[in-house]
């Protein structure tokens, strides 16, 4: 699964893997981002929970996107330029708990996604995940978030 993030006023669209997006949100939280929750897509007008982890066309408000960008930017100095996980085994974290800040719905989404590629990153800290070449991708994501409001689809 991947996320297409679309910035309507510039028509810029970026695609990120589930692993990347989950780790970016986690890193943002570690560096002070307080999620405002997403705005509901019109088709969910009674039951929307404000999640970031589905791709249902939900909207991230401009203030929230810029706050996420600022938090991620604060992390850049702490992210190694080389990847320390040369021989890392994703099975080594299998008994670890999910991050406490996730909503129950988001925990279920992640648990369902373990077979969809998340197994290999949930035990890795965000600083480790973004180390090395992935740090460049994170800086591009920060620039995208600075543009303001975007849609997750």
Image (tube, rainbow, N blue to C red):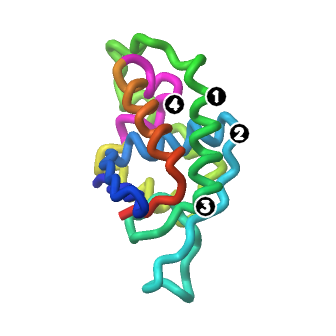
Q: Secondary structure at mark 2?
A: loop
The circle on residue 103 is: 3
| Between 112 and 65, the one nearer to me in the picture | 65
Label ID, residue 74: 1
- Can residue 49 be seen in the rendering of this structure? yes
Task: Decide which of 99, 27 is in the foreground and name it.
Answer: 27
The question of residue 122 being in magenta is answered with yes
Q: Residues within 10 Å of mark 3 (few under 14, many from 20)?
A: few
State how far apart marks 4 and 2 are (Cα).
Answer: 14 Å
Judge the density around disc 1: few (<14), some (14-19), many (≥20) Cα neighbours within 10 Å. Answer: some
Q: Which residue is mark 4?
A: 126
Report the residue at 60% width, 26% height from top.
75
Query: Which type of secondary structure does the marked residue at label 4 adopt?
Result: helix
Q: Is residue 9 magenta?
A: no
Q: Residue at x 32, y 53 (%)?
A: 13
Q: Nearer the viewer, mark 1 or mark 2?
A: 1
Which marked residue is nearer to the observer: mark 3 or mark 1? Answer: 1
Ranked by sequence position, the earlier of labels 4 and 2 is 2
Q: For the magenta stretch, what is the residue range? A: 119-132
- Relative image position of residue 99 (x, y in whole percent): 60, 45
Report if the CB atoms under discs 4 and 2 are less than 8 Å apart: no
* Residue under numbered circle 2: 32
Are the residues at dot 1 and dot 2 in contact (C-beta closer than 8 Å)?
yes
Q: Earlier in the sequence, mark 1 or mark 2?
A: 2
Residue 21 on image: x %, y %: 43, 45
In the structure shown, which secondary structural element does the residue marked by tag 3 occupy?
A: loop
Q: Earlier in the sequence, mark 3 or mark 2?
A: 2
User: 52 and 144: which one is in front?
Assistant: 144
Give residue 115's position: percent from left, percent from top.
30, 50
Q: Nearer the viewer, mark 3 or mark 2?
A: 2
């Amino acid at each position: 699964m991947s996320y297409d993030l679309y910035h309507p006023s510039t028509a810029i669209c970026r695609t990120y893997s589930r692993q990347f997006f989950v780790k970016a949100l986690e890193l943002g939280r570690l560096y002070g981002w307080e999620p405002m929750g997403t705005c509901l897509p019109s088709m969910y007008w009674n039951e929307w929970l404000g999640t970031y982890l589905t791709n249902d066309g939900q909207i991230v408000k401009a203030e929230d996107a810029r706050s996420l960008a600022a938090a991620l930017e604060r992390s850049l100095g702490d992210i190694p330029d080389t990847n320390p996980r040369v021989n890392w085994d994703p099975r080594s974290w299998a008994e670890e708990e999910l991050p406490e800040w996730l909503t129950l719905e988001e925990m279920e989404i992640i648990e369902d996604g373990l077979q969809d590629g998340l197994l290999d990153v949930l035990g890795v800290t965000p600083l480790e995940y973004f180390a090395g070449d992935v740090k460049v991708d994170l800086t591009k994501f920060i620039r995208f978030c600075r543009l303001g409001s975007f849609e997750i689809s």
